[in-house]
Image (cartoon, grey):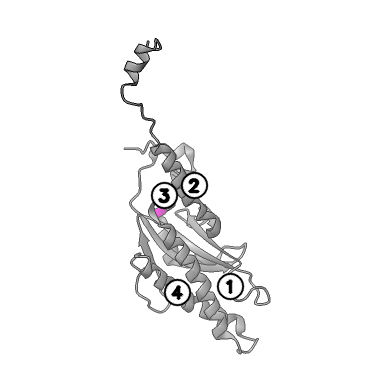
Amino acid sequence: MAQPTQETIHDLLVRNIPRELVMGLEEAKLVGAQRAYAAARGMDDGHLPSVVGQLRHFHMNESFHRALAVGGASPSPLRGNQIITGRAGIFTLARFNTKYGVWNSGRRSETRKQMSLANAAIEPLVQPELFSDYVLPSDAVVFLVACFAGSLHVQPESPVSIQIAVPDRNMESWLFREPVDLFVKRYDQKQTTTQDDLAMPTLKKNIGKQQDKDGTGS
């Protein structure tokens, strides 16, 4: 049966992924990047970019894995170049690094592209004409993306931006993407909305009798 509620991608994310986990993964990516750059210092400039890139992969994988474990998100084992994934609600969580402004790196992985096929189920949320076909999914994928400057002369020790991103089924476009520091504010918005919804007016006892006595009753 079609889902009648006008849900959004960010509603799904906020409902399924705890704020503490999102913030922990953001911190993990920062720490991994810093450790990678520190480990590469002293290498020859001729191959320093390649060394930093390799070390970012391994250090950021390790820190990402650790944050998933701390957040109770059941991380997959650390094994060489394999993609590290975790699970929160309906979402499989994974990561990749890319150049700021150009997000080609993610699509180079056949594994990530296969993972993204699950998001066919949530594409109707950003295509209103298809919303009648939407059924609450049991599986979807989201990436934590570290965007680097693309030059070791500009902020080489950390990403310029860390974003939370939900790809379409073909990983050719993004159903949702937003810097993590902005995204976490949505949890406060959700909490406020929920509190407002739960605020039910109550009538004083015997109010009907009082109205009859003073002539205001219908």
Q: Earlier in the sequence, mark 1 or mark 3?
A: 3
Q: Are marks 1 and 3 in contact (CB under 8 Å)?
A: no
- Identified at 32% across, 16% down, the residue is 209
Q: Which residue is mark 2?
A: 189
C-alpha gap between disc 1 and disc 3: 29 Å
C-alpha gap between disc 4 and disc 2: 29 Å
| Residue type at tag 1 | Ser
- Mark 1: few, some, or many residues within 10 Å (few <14, many ≥20)? many
Q: Is residue 86 above or below residue 169?
A: below
Label 4 sits on a secondary structure element that is helix
C-alpha gap between disc 4 and disc 1: 14 Å
Q: Position of residue 40 (x, y in %)?
A: 57, 85
Q: Earlier in the sequence, mark 4 or mark 3?
A: 3
Q: Is residue 39 above or below residue 117?
A: below
Q: Which residue is mark 1?
A: 158
C-alpha gap between disc 2 and disc 3: 14 Å
Q: Is residue 137 above or below residue 128?
A: below
Q: Give the overall secondary structure of the magenta segment.
A: helix
C-alpha gap between disc 2 and disc 1: 29 Å
Instruction: Between label 4 and label 2, give the one nearer the viewer.
Output: 2
Q: Quadrant of residue 141?
A: bottom left
Q: Position of residue 123 (x, y in %)?
A: 45, 47
Label 1 sits on a secondary structure element that is loop
Q: Earlier in the sequence, mark 2 or mark 1?
A: 1
| Residue type at tag 2 | Gln
Q: Are marks 4 and 1 in contact (CB under 8 Å)?
A: no
Q: Is residue 95 above or below residue 45?
A: above
The boundaries of the magenta stretch are 118-122
Q: Which residue is mark 3?
A: 12
Q: Position of residue 180 (x, y in %)?
A: 52, 59
Q: Which residue is mark 4?
A: 63
